[in-house]
Amino acid sequence: MHLFWGLLIAAIGVCFFTCGRRQSHFMVYRLLAARSQLIWKKNVHKFYQVAGALLTIFGILLAAGYVSIK
C-alpha cells in the first residue's frame, strides 16, 4: 500500500514542479497558484517548484519504504 501512495505523491510532486516551471495554464494549477499568490506574491511559481521537488522526494522515500505513515 505504501508503494501506491508513494508513487501517487511523487506523481503529484512532479506535476507541481513541471507546472511551476512552465507557469502552466492547467486549471487546477491556476486555482492553487491564485490562492497561494496572496502569500507568495511573485514567487508563487518558485514555491510550487520547491514544493513539487520535496513532494517527489518524499513520495519516492515512501514508496521505497524508508518513511512510514502510521
Image (tube, grey):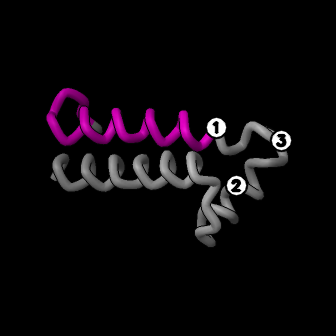
- Nearest the eye: 59 or 30: 30
Estimate the x, y position of residue 8 in percent, counting from the top left.
31, 55
Please tell me whether mark 2 sits on a helix, a strand or a loop: helix
Query: Would residue 49 be visible to someone looking at this image?
Result: yes
Residue 67 drawn in magenta: yes
Q: Are marks 2 and 3 in contact (CB under 8 Å)?
A: no
First along the sequence among labels 2 and 1: 2
Disc 2 residue type? Ala
Q: Would you say 63 lies left or right of 10 here? A: left
Q: CA distance from mark 2 to mark 1?
A: 9 Å
Magenta: main secondary structure equals helix
The crowding category of the residue bearing disc 2, from other C-alpha atoms within 10 Å (few below 14, some 14 to 19, many at least 20), is: many
Inspect the image, locate mark 3, and give the three-letter code of the amino acid beneath it.
Lys
For residue 57: magenta?
yes
Q: Secondary structure at mark 3?
A: helix
Q: Which mark is residue 36?
A: none
Q: Which residue is mark 2?
A: 33
**Of label 1 and label 3, which has the lower sequence position?**
3
Quadrant showing the C terminus? top left
The residues tagged by marks 1 and 3 sit, at their Cα atoms, a distance apart of: 10 Å
Residue at image point 64% right, 54% down = 23
Residue 70 visible, this orientation:
no
Which residue is identified by label 3? 41
Distance from the alpha carbon under mark 2 to that under mark 3: 10 Å
In magenta, the rendered stretch is: 46-68
